[in-house]
Amino acid sequence: MVSPVPAPHRMSPAVVVLLLTLLLGIQPITTDLYLPALPTLQRELSASLAATQLTLSALIICFGLAQLVCGPLADRFGRRPVLLVGLSVYTLASVGGAMAPSIDWLIAWRALQGAGMAAAVTCGRSIVRDLYPPHDGARVMSRALSGLGVIAMASPLVGGMVVQWFSWQAALMVVAVCGALMLGVVAWHYEETVPLRDPRATQIGPLLHNWAAVAGHPTFRAWTLLSGFAYGGLFFLLAGSSFVYIGLLGTSKVTYGLIMLSQSFAYIVGTFWCRRLLARHGLRGAVRRGALFTLAGCVGMATLSLAGVHAVWAVLLPSWLYCVGHGVHQPCGQTGAIGPFPDKAGTAASLSGFWMMLVAFGVGLFLGGSASGTVLPMALGMSTLGLLLCATAWTLVQRHGDPAGEPLAAQARPA
């Protein structure tokens, strides 16, 4: 059993994992549960396709930018107050979105929702570094991300059923209920974990200094690049797969839902494998081996698409391989990036998260401007980021990815 750093009050490991699962799982709840409602709300609000898509783009943009604010705030005031305020804003914004009388109001509420979501995700990543050294933190993170995978599997199905049986407003009310439940869990079970508050963390001078110190650290850059490339490749699947499977390959919506379910399952398998790799090979050894799955997935998809093989299996099998690798890279990357900064974990988590959202935003712009009626934009885009990930995992991470003096082959310590 891994042991957290000494603290006046200790939460049990089960409570920590539950908190992390909920805080990190807020992202698929906010996006995946909402996706089935898009066609219905577009029709009922008489909105254009561009305005409807802006309800997602505004969420992502504000989520990325707000992390830059939430991280320093959490370092100054502690994780608990930022979480309570952020989850309150998130819940109220979800209710506001459900009651929105027009698409413009819905876009505004979704933007505010993204800001509240940023507080949850940034503090969740920071809590891991507050309580655990990097190696143990990666294993705890992988357990939480296994739970996130289950949430990602369930969210589209729940959202689809709620929209079909009730309305798109009901889907957003389900999101609001989830936010309220998370707020209750944090209020009743979370005990402050920040080791030492930094009263200067939000002052412009110290803030810029902290950003420069974090961004200039080679370990941070190595793991953050890895996380960003990994998430960008996954975002190609999330943003482009519906057009490929349904629009090009002719699958039904039900079949597409099952395909997304299978990809989430492959991701969960990757998180379980991650814990075994960490016990035997440490952080750097885990991503070095996980990158083999990433390489097989991205090269396989690119090769098949360039060869003109347009079939469901030619996209699905490589995506499974990629998602297994993603289940290794994300827990390692997110904990490795903040590992060198126990005194400013919030700032490091916010910069790392901002980079991931920046890459995702770039992926969205690329897909929006490269529609060709083929699988190639998604396949080649995902493959490019996958190759960049492999290069990072096998070079920069191996050279600079030691966040806390970790030996390359860490001793096995069951999480």
Image (cartoon, rainbow, N blue to C red):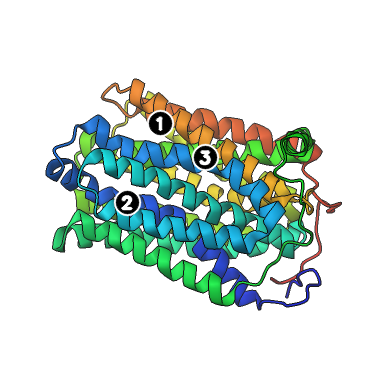
Q: Is residue 220 visible?
A: yes
Rendered residue at 66%/39% (across/down): 224
Residue 36 percent across, percent down from the top left: 24, 50
**Helix, strand or loop at mark 1:** helix
* Image quadrant in which you'd find residue 79: bottom right
Helix, strand or loop at label 2? It is helix
Instruction: Say what amino acid the circle numbered 2 marks.
Output: Ile
| Residue toward you, 124 or 319 | 124
Asked if marks 3 and 2 touch (Cβ < 8 Å), the reply is no
- Please state the horizontal and vertical placement of residue 344, each as a whole percent of the image: 75, 49
Which residue matches tag 2? Answer: 259
Tag 1 residue:
364
Residue 310: image quadrant is top left
Q: In this view, does 129 lie above or below 312?
A: below
**Residue at which label 3 appears:** 64
Give x and y (percent) for residue 218.
78, 35
Front residue of this view, candidates 196 and 306:
196
* Distance between the alpha carbons at the discs numbered 3 and 1: 14 Å
Residue depicted at x 44% and y 40%: 60
In space, the residues marked 3 and 2 are separated at their CA atoms by: 28 Å
Q: Residues within 10 Å of mark 3 (few under 14, many from 20)?
A: many
Q: Where is residue 256 in the image (x, y as percent from the top left)?
A: 26, 49
Check disc 1 and give the amino acid type: Gly
Pointer 3 or 2: first along the chain: 3
User: With respect to residue 125, does 42 lie above or below?
Assistant: above
Amino acid type, residue under disc 3 in the picture: Gly
Image vertical order of residue 145 relative to residue 338, above or below: below
Q: In which quarter of the image is the C terminus?
A: bottom right
Q: Tag on residue 227?
A: none
Measured Cα–Cα span from mark 1 to mark 2:
21 Å
The mark nearer the N terminus, 1 or 2, is 2
Closer mark to the observer between disc 3 and disc 2: 3
